[in-house]
Amino acid sequence: MNSLQIHNPATGALITTLPADDATSVTTKAAQARAAQPAWAAVPLAERKACITRFRAGMVAELDGLAATMTAETGKPIKMSRNELNGLLARIDFFLAEVDAQLATQTVFAEGGMTEQIQHTPLGVVANISAWNYPWFVGGNVYVPALLTGNAVLYKPSEFAAMSGLAMARLLHAAGVPKDVFVPLIGTGEVGAALMAQKIDGMFFTGSYATGAKIAQVLAPRMVKLQLELGGKDPTYVAEDADPKAAAESLADGAMYNTGQSCCSVERIYVHEKIHDAFVAAFIGSVKTFKVGSPAAEDTYIGAITRAPQLDVLEAQVADAQAKGATLLTGGTRLPGPGNWFAPTVFKDVNHSMELMREESFGPIIGIQKVSGDLEAVSLMNDTRYGLTAGMFTQDEARAKALLAQVNSGSVYWNCCDRVSPRLPWSGHGDSGVGLTLSTYGIATFTRPKAWHLRQA
Ligand code: NAD
């Protein structure tokens, strides 16, 4: 057995050392899941729903402790950890309410003794390799509907959120999901790679483009259903008729929430030249109110950077932007340790020659670029290889809809940002990924349609 050390990114302290998987244990567990899945699929849906309902109750009963664990291992401010757990409860409610309709067999034709039906069967054994930045959200988006629809799940939490992953497994097992049906696999990318070597019927991955591309290369020849939820460089445009203060407050939060470590963080801001200066002043005013501090403190807004190497990425983006003429308005440096800290950082006078406006930052850092109008804004918004979310602030709904229709991204926002709804599909265009989670499509994605042609003798 391997082991995995878990450190607190806010202090650098070792929290614990967990037993971890290796290639042999992954193979054994995958075989056990394969053997267990048919019986789970045969459990009546009402009973599978009862398991997930009990899991939800277990989350509620332990919410404060689960939040503290997530905060300790990821550096996420404690209030945001509780928000995430409460947010997952709402997603669970959505899945529970919608799953019956998604699994019901549909009769699509019945005439002259001929009946045609669509049956929705589980994929089988699915793998879920997950990210650390919202471990409960991105895990739950996959394993809750996957389990409800009768799949077995091999779940590899990020090595930066493994304690939370084990808590999920403990609560699911206590709620009645068999241990071989929801199987946590603990370890680094090596364990993820060992998981890909198994016979699986679906791979549901959340993480970086770099890892997603490796996974796609390995699985492509094997005809395994593949979903990749990857990074972004999400833009927002603030038009001249928007209230600069209201837009700035919303976008400062969208850029810096979770210390900027959200897949749908606002990562680029384009502001009409007529209100640019007022917007920038209000934006800086908002950012100055963000308290940097211990993630365990109730009033902390900016917590730790979860992965130490990301500090180098942030520093390199700052240096590159400054070298190319950007104006640094606040921040721009690491903060003293122990632990991984970066000051909230705002640039103006940026352009697309800068890494800051091209590559995912995944930290509390943002560039604000002045634009002359809608045409320039939409062209810059689309000048990216990513396409997760995009937004526009304006009083004019028709203008927002016309502009956002031209933007190549999975989600679009009018007068809001950094928002995910259980009722809407969550998907990326371009290098932000393939496939989707959430909405009723995010339940159906864990099933295969089987076409029945039935002729009476
Ligand atoms: P990552 O790619 O470093 O790791 C993700 C997972 O992949 C981890 O569990 C890791 O152990 C595993 N892994 C690493 N190498 C592997 C390999 N060779 N084979 C198999 N598995 C391997 O990403 P991360 O740092 O955990 O997450 C941050 C990224 O996730 C950001 O780019 C962020 O935008 C993205 N993200 C996207 C969404 C979305 O919904 N689109 C949501 C959350 C995070």
Image: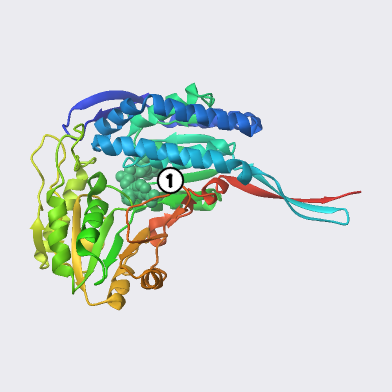
- In the figure, residue 42 lies in which quadrant? top right
Q: Residue at x 18, y 54 (%)?
A: 365
Label 1: few (<14), some (14–19) or many (≥20) C-alpha neighbours in 10 Å: many
Please state the quadrant of the image where ligand 1 appears.
top left
The reply, left or right, for residue 411 in relation to residue 41 is left
The residue type indicated by label 1 comes to Phe
As displayed, is residue 304 above or below residue 278?
above
Rendered location of residue 13, percent (x, y): 18, 28
Q: Residue at x 47, y 28 (%)?
A: 55
Quarter containing the N terminus: top left
The reply, left or right, for residue 334 in relation to residue 425 is left
Q: Residue at x 41, y 38 (%)?
A: 88
The reply, left or right, for residue 210 in relation to residue 295 is right
As displayed, is residue 218 above or below residue 93?
below
Q: Is residue 196 visible?
A: no
Q: Is residue 254 visible?
A: yes
Color theme of the render: rainbow
Q: Which residue is mark 1?
A: 205
Q: Which residue lies most toward the right here?
A: 457
Q: Nearer the viewer, residue 377 or 160?
A: 377
Rendered location of residue 288, percent (x, y): 12, 50
Q: Is disc 1 placed on a helix, strand or loop?
A: strand
Rendered location of residue 126, percent (x, y): 52, 40
The reply, left or right, for residue 351 in relation to residue 206 is left
Q: Nearer the viewer, residue 48 or 432?
A: 48
Q: How many marks?
A: 1
As displayed, is residue 241 above or below residue 206?
below
Rendered location of residue 346, percent (x, y): 14, 57
Query: Assess mark 1: CB under 8 A from ligand 1?
Result: yes
Q: Residue at x 13, y 68 (%)?
A: 277
